[in-house]
Amino acid sequence: MNQPAGWYPDPQRTGEQRYWNGAAWTEHRAAAAIQFAVQPGAVTAPAGAVLGDKSPGLAGFLSFLISGLGQLYAGDVGRGLAWFFGMLGGWIVTWFLSIVSLGLLGLVLFPVMIGLYIWCIIDAASTTHKANYVLRSSQPIALTGPVAQGPYPGPQQPGRPALPPTSEPGAYN
């Protein structure tokens, strides 16, 4: 083996590392560093986005057009239908009571309905954020770049010499 001295995977014991002094294997052994196999180009979505993400802004806009539509867009059908029928019923009651009471109850209920309308728009964006969080939490993490060597940020691990790159993987003498 024409490799400089350093820690390498033990050719005799799987899951361990052994120290190569530059000429021969020593008796110094340690647990192997964790290696993560990474395929370059595995990430296809823009940074910070996951395929299937929904836009909170679009969800808010959809609920601006029709109450509950943003929640439906986010994937929460029950919440979307509850907002739609709740707001529809609320506006019908507001207009009916406004006509019956010659506008007096309408003056009280109209600001309440406007507040609920705004709350519906904000809830659509919030529901979309939650749906995106659940989506990101359920998807495996795809990384790009070189293979990571263990839990430490660099090739140097505490108490060990640096792990040099091998030109011949798996070639040990």
Image (spheres, grey):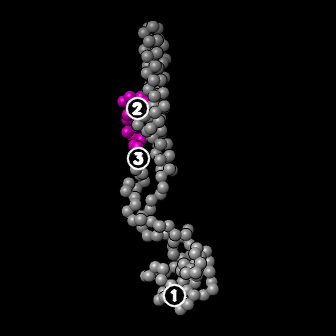
Q: Nearer the viewer, mark 2 or mark 1?
A: 1
Q: Nearer the viewer, residue 166 or 46?
A: 166
Q: Nearer the viewer, residue 8 or 148?
A: 8
* Residue that carries the numbered disc 3 in the rendered image: 52
Q: CA distance from mark 2 to mark 1?
A: 67 Å
Q: Nearer the viewer, mark 3 or mark 1?
A: 1
* Residue that carries the numbered disc 2 in the rendered image: 69
Q: Is residue 135 above or below residue 147?
A: above
* Residue that carries the numbered disc 1 in the rendered image: 173
Q: State which tag comes first along the sequence, 2 or 1.
A: 2
Q: Is residue 157 above or below residue 132?
A: below
Does residue 66 show up magenta in the picture? yes
Residue 172 left/right relative to 49: right
Q: Nearer the viewer, residue 5 or 108?
A: 5
Does residue 104 show up magenta in the picture? no
Q: State which tag comes first along the sequence, 3 or 2.
A: 3
> How far across and how far down the image is residue 42, in percent?
40, 60
Q: Which residues are magenta?
A: 52-69
Q: State which tag comes first along the sequence, 3 or 1.
A: 3
Q: Amino acid at mark 2?
A: Leu
Q: At x 41% / y 46%, what residue is drawn? A: 53
Do the CB atoms of the residues marked 3 and 2 lie less than 8 Å apart?
Answer: no
Residue 113 in view, yes or no = no
Q: At x 62% / y 83%, what residue is drawn? A: 28
Q: At x 38% / y 54%, what residue is drawn? A: 45
Q: Nearer the viewer, residue 156 or 95?
A: 156
